[in-house]
Image: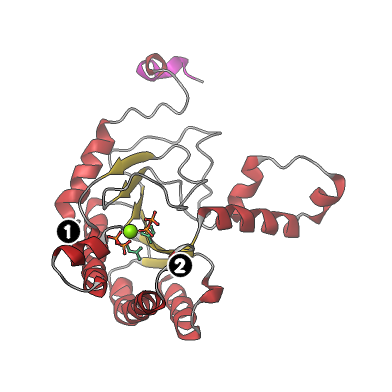
């Protein structure tokens, strides 16, 4: 497994196509409301948009795609909407895992899955095992994920593995946590996309987005298609990623540290 370093310590190499794209898929409810449909209709169309974007990501040569499907705060929604979302997640796992495998895609699910129904947990485990050595896209579904949960669980895991660090009171270096974060198997996202018009992070990848390029669009998730993804990628390509350096340093790479 490759070891990815932190963008606040080392400067990642720049590429035309983002290696890792992370998306907050927002706006399903409003999509349905605009059509006088129940919210569930928006969530169903949202699953179709996921299929389109996964296919497009493979075609564009993106290595890692991380999709926020259910946040740790989404339990606050009405119970009937939560159970519809769980049902959709369960059905999607049943229907899609085989297709992902046929297409060489590796599936990962990240978040506190302990709160999910046993059937969902079983499908996650078997899906991850089945697709574990697939070489193409790594598709991560963030479910019952929260950025603060992630940092806290990484710290807990670090101290569990290094009990001596607790005892001798040594300061905890940020990079020491990195291997224990939920997405340690992926480079940090190059491009973050949020659909649905809101310009906030909503407790998604707090640590990992330190140097990610951000792209917000008013387009609602069920309407997000290949052309919309291409638009985000083309904006990404025009960005100057300085990682703390000056523009002048980028123009003369030989003199930059
Ligand atoms: C995103 O769409 C899907 C989930 C959070 C599960 P929303 O359901 O938040 O849609 P809006 O924001 O109400 O339009
Ligand atoms: C963020 O969307 C979570 C997901 C897309 C899964 P929300 O619609 O729940 O975000 P907030 O609460 O409006 O910020
Ligand atoms: Mg929303």
Residue 37: image x %, image y %?
A: 17, 72
Dividing the picture into quarters, in which one does residue 246 lie?
top left
Tell me: 257 left or right of 196.
right
Does residue 89 appear in the picture of this structure?
yes
**CA–CA distance in space, label 1 to label 2:** 25 Å
| Number of residues whose C-alpha sits closer than 10 Å to that of mark 1, classed few (under 14), some (14–19) or many (20 or more) | some
Residue 2 is a magenta residue: no
Q: Give the x, y percent position of residue 210.
A: 48, 39
Nearer the N terminus, badge 1 or badge 2? Answer: 2
Q: In this view, does 169 lie above or below 253?
A: below
- Element carrying mark 2: helix
- Crowding around mark 2 (Cα neighbors within 10 Å: few <14, some 14 to 19, many 20+) is few
Q: Mark 2 points at which residue?
A: 76
Q: In this view, does 2 lie above or below 170?
A: below
Which quarter holds ligand 1?
bottom left
Numbered label attached to residue 223: 1
What are the residue bounds of the magenta stretch? 250-256
The mark tally for this picture is: 2
Q: In this view, does 24 lie above or below 99?
A: above
Q: Which residue is drawn at 74% across and 55% down?
A: 159
**Residue extending furthest bottom?**
119
Badge 1 element: helix
């Amino acid at each position: 497994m490759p070891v990815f370093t932190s963008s606040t310590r080392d400067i990642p190499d720049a590429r035309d196509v983002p290696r890792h794209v992370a998306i907050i898929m927002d706006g399903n409810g409003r999509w349905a409301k605009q059509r006088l449909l129940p919210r569930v209709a928006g969530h169903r169309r949202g699953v179709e948009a996921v299929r389109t974007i996964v296919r497009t990501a493979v075609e564009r040569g993106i290595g890692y795609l991380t999709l926020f499907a259910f946040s740790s705060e989404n339990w606050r929604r009405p119970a009937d909407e939560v159970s519809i979302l769980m049902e959709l997640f369960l059905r999607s796992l049943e229907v899609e895992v085989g297709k992902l495998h046929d297409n060489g895609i590796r599936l990962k699910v990240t978040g506190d899955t302990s709160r999910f129904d046993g059937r969902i947990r079983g499908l996650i485990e078997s899906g991850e095992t089945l697709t574990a050595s697939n070489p193409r896209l790594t598709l991560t579904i963030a479910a019952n994920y929260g950025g603060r949960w992630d940092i806290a669980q990484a710290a807990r895991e670090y101290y569990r593995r290094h009990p001596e660090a607790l005892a001798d009171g040594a300061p905890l270096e940020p990079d020491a946590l990195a291997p224990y974060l939920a997405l340690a198997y992926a480079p940090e996202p190059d491009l973050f996309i949020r659909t649905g018009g809101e310009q906030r992070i909503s407790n998604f990848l707090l640590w990992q987005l330190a140097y990610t390029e951000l792209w917000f669009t008013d387009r609602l998730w069920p309407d997000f298609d290949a052309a919309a993804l291409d638009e985000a990628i083309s904006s990404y390509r025009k960005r100057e990623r300085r990682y703390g350096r000056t523009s002048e340093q980028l123009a003369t790479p030989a003199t930059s540290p």
